[in-house]
Amino acid sequence: MDTGRAAELAAFFTKHVQHEHPNQTASAVLTAQNIALLVTTPILESITKMSETLGTAITGLQADVAALTTVANDAVAKITSLSTELSAAVASAAAAGATPDQLAALNALDASIKADSAALSAAVTPAAPAAP
């Protein structure tokens, strides 16, 4: 416990004892100060430990989210690359004489890949924080 805070609590309890029991001796006041320290020290230590534990958990969670975001962004890049290659293959096939009917399934697949990529990209893009 911070020395200043301990002194502040001791002063509070001293005033309380002196106000409530003006005829008490200095040893009674000292006992009140000791009780204050005995009561508050474990509570403050417990709060400090919980705060440290929570801080560690938050740091770990932030690292996990960053790793997952990296994986998702890599997936979006690979899917986008696949779509680009598929589009180029369709254009090449069309230039070589493939008919629109022959390419319809590939065009539908490309459209589906683009839609899925956009959805994945939107899912991993951080949203703006809500206004307080």
Image: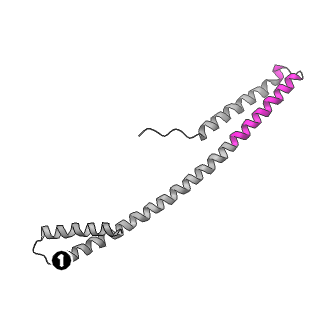
| Image x and y of residue 30, in percent | 22, 76
Q: Is residue 71 magenta?
A: no
Q: Who's the residue at 81% across and 20% down the image?
A: 100
Q: Nearer the viewer, residue 17 or 57?
A: 17
Point out the image quarter for the C terminus: top left
| Image x and y of residue 38, in percent | 30, 73
Point out the image quarter for the N terminus: bottom left
Q: Which residue is mark 1?
A: 28
Task: From this view, report whether residue 127 is shown above or below residue 58.
Answer: above
Q: Nearer the viewer, residue 11 or 33?
A: 11
Disc 1 crowd, CA 10 A, few/some/many (<14, 14-19, 20+): some
Q: Is residue 122 left or right of residue 112?
A: left
Task: From this view, report whether residue 77 is shown above or below residue 65.
Answer: above
| Image x and y of residue 27, in percent | 18, 79
Outermost residue toward the right in this view: 96
Task: From this view, report whether residue 125 is shown above or below residue 62.
Answer: above
Q: Who's the residue at 26% across and 70% down the image?
A: 36
Q: Who's the residue at 85% across and 23% down the image?
A: 94
Task: From this view, report whether residue 82 is shown above or below residue 9.
Answer: above
Question: What is the magenta range?
Answer: 75-102
Q: Is residue 1 left or right of residue 13?
A: right
Q: Main secondary structure of the magenta part?
A: helix
Q: Who's the residue at 77% across and 26% down the image?
A: 107
**What count of labels does the image hold?**
1
| Image x and y of residue 92, in percent | 86, 26
